[in-house]
Image (spheres, helix red, strand yellow):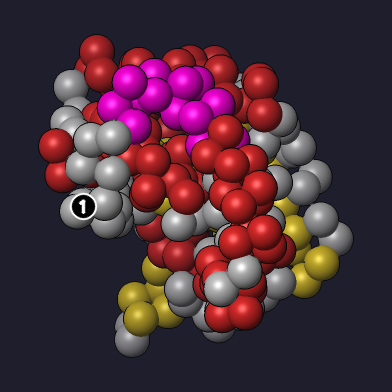
Amino acid sequence: MVLATKNLVKCFGGLRALDGVSISVADKSITLVIGPNGSGKSTLINVISGIYRPDEGKVVFRGRDITGLPPYEVYRAGVVRTFQVPLLFRKLTVLENMLVAARGNPGESLLNSLLRRAWARREEELAEKAFRILELLNLDHLWDKPASELSGGQMKLLEVGRALMADPRVLLMDEPIAGVNPRLAHEILEHLTELRRKLGVAMMIVEHRLDIALPYADHVYVMNRGRVISQGSPDEVLEDREVVRAYLGG
């Protein structure tokens, strides 16, 4: 397993948002975490990515304990996330948004930024890499457009592309199809499946739209009231009565 949580607990006052959550993500897989609103899904992704520190439990990435590391160190380790509402630089072009996310950009060094030979070739390589990823996302024809001119679905894909510029081993996505129509939601998930196949990156997708997201997953965890109540293949969780009760009540 490339990523695992072990008995995570996170409380906000009297609310136990995570109550002993243990999940694992296999290398080069798509792992789906689903559940009704308020089940603890977003808290889980925030703990893994370092935004929240757990009160108990561990987060382990490639055998390394990364529990409680700040977000930038989790990012450097190889765990990169996207947000439900894309956090883009809206005045920058699509290509510029991609380039600012690259690791080891030579422009980050004051000395190298003054020496063209030190960064020119690297800039070309990063631009080529960005175009390869944009092509996979069907955004390459929009490379020179300001991010503000993209549709909502295109913004979500650009956020994914920007995350991939960091060469993650695990990509965490918080509701990547929230707020988009079913047709576009399927297109986004198809792009993600293709990216997993071609780039070999593992994905943990947090989502509540069970009907749309399930067919794309290798393994599924279902959460409710801060706990994992079911796990298995998509077919297995669909047949679990506890899952039906969590979504429909009764």
Span highlighted in magenta in the image: 129-143
Please indicate, yes or no, whether residue 31 appears anywhere in the rendered image: no
Outermost residue, bottom side: 13
Residue nearer the viewer, 155 or 82:
155
Residue at (45, 16) in percent of width and height: 190
In percent of width and height, residue 71 lies at 53, 72
On whether residue 105 falls in the magenta region, the answer is no
Q: Quadrant of the C terminus?
A: top left
Residue at (42, 79) in percent of width and height: 11
Residue at (47, 21) in percent of width and height: 135
Q: Secondary structure at mark 1?
A: loop
In the rendered view, does 26 fall on the left or right side of 142? right
What's the amino acid at mark 1? Arg
Residue nearer the viewer, 83 or 116:
116
Q: Residues within 10 Å of mark 1 (few under 14, many from 20)?
A: some
Residue indicated by mark 1:
90
Please indicate, yes or no, whether residue 105 appears anywhere in the rendered image: yes
